[in-house]
Image: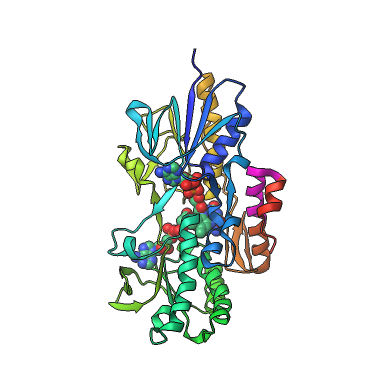
Amino acid sequence: SRVPRIVILGAGYGGVVTSLRLQKLLNYNEADVTLVNKHDYHYITTHLHMPAAGTDKPDNARVNISSLIDEFKVDFVKSTVVQIRPGEKKVILEDGTLSYDYLVIGLGGEPETFGIPGLKEYAMTIRSINSVRHIREHIEYQFARFKQEPDRKELLTFVVGGAGFSGIEFVGELADRIPELCKEFDVDPALVHIYNIEAAPTALPGFDPELVEYAMRLLTDKGVTFKIATAIKECTPEGVLIAGDEFIKAGTVIWTGGIRGNHLLEDAGFETMRGRIKVDEFLRAPGYDNIFVTGDCSLVMNPEGRPYPPTAQIATQQGENCAFNLVASIRGNALKEFAFVNRGTVASLGKGEAIGIVGTKKMKGGTAALMKKVIDMRYLYTIGGLPLVVRKGKLR
Ligand code: FAD
Ligand code: NAD
């Protein structure tokens, strides 16, 4: 009889780890495994704030999928998924169709704009290699343009909408990059403005207040102006309208105001919350015992009944659990419940600076920055072993 066919959509944190674990767990000819991804590389999303600001090269934030997976065990297909048809057990690609017995959905998230007018059209988002190359080029171009049109001071104003971890990490890098750009383009640093605008009563809502204060003080000293408890209400080609009907003219608006699940899930008819599928205890989509969901596409509740934030950390752990449960499903064994183990949160504030909580220990400054590197390298080691750590590990 035919061996079961497993199709994995998306080679992000969830999809790559699922593939790598399956490679290890499956016996020869026990299943056909196909991994589908839009690009022939995996991107290290947790590094993207650096190439976006131009403090690192985009190439350092990506890895060729062929160097990660064993192509004798996992068939890689470079293509874009355009539709999932769970009723027919089919996936429609831009250039073909795949049938599956088991499906893993790991297509990641999309920017959540909450219907705020103009954000989709006029704000840029940090989400892929292509998007961060665009942001970096755009920022440099504003400096070049300003030298041609010196009356247009707004070209040197940078608005970052949302002071969650993505926004904070990005302004940290941008503040590091500005002095370099001012030098390169002969621009007076006093003319440059970076605004980080946050709707909630604090930056990094929900995070430790002492560490938030440390971060805000440090970033303010580096030249970032925070506008807290101030929602962005509209974005136009000229800038942003914020609460209180103030308009900030800006040549650059970066939206880091949140993410939602991939729109293909809603399109497929799955029940979603903010675009994400609330999975069962084994990470399956409700009503389907052959569809597993990982990462930003999934919603997992913590023991208090609130959703865990979508992170690379949880996506990676889900990938391991998914692989285990796929193999168990094929073999007719008992599935394992997913249990998230929080290893902590560390966020960069630019070169040599970070804040974080690991276990019960609060960290800031150089110690936290070192911890951030350790976490990043541990991930590289998990997916690509020592050679990948040496090639892509940030030792700066
Ligand atoms: P992703 O990693 O987003 O991967 C999805 C994959 O699917 C991509 O390869 C994409 O190309 C592919 N894809 C999408 N659509 C299609 C399609 N239609 N067809 C084919 N392929 C498709 N989390 C942490 O835990 N720690 C951090 O330090 C951290 N830092 C971050 C910094 C930044 C700047 C950002 C933006 C996020 C950060 N996160 C961090 C969050 C983390 O990156 C995400 O939660 C994580 O990437 C989710 O993994 P995933 O597997 O769901 O999807
Ligand atoms: P987020 O949802 O965590 O933060 C978005 C922020 O934007 C919130 O503080 C929200 O109040 C604010 N906001 C929403 N609407 C707004 C408006 N109209 N005007 C102004 N502000 C508005 O999103 P994120 O920062 O992109 O993070 C996404 C996920 O990735 C999270 O789970 C996060 O934990 C994770 N992440 C982790 C790290 C890290 O661990 N170092 C780094 C980046 C992202």
Q: Residue 355's x, y, as percent?
A: 59, 65
Q: Residue 307's x, y, as percent?
A: 43, 48
The quadrant of the picture occupied by the C terminus is bottom right
313 relative to 251, above or below: above
389 relative to 167, above or below: above
Which residue is pictured at 66% across the width and 49% down the height? 378
Nearer to me, 27 or 169: 27
Q: Which residues are magenta?
A: 374-385
Tell me if residue 378 is in the magenta stretch: yes
Please tell me in which quadrant of the rendered image residue 113 appears: bottom left
User: In the displayed image of the protein, which residue is found farthest to the top?
Assistant: 1
Residue 107 appearing in the image: no
Residue 34 appearing in the image: yes
Which residue is pictured at 34% across the width and 65% down the height? 122
Q: Residue 58's x, y, as percent?
A: 56, 59
Q: Main secondary structure of the magenta part?
A: helix
Judge from the rendering whether residue 150 lies leftward or rightward of residue 212; answer left or right.
left
Q: How is the image coloured?
A: rainbow
211 relative to 147, above or below: above
Judge from the rendering whether residue 116 lies leftward or rightward of residue 366; answer left or right.
left
Judge from the rendering whether residue 364 lies leftward or rightward of residue 275; answer left or right.
right
Tell me if residue 304 is in the magenta stretch: no
Q: Residue 33's x, y, as percent?
A: 52, 29
Which residue is pictured at 58% across the width and 73% down the height? 176
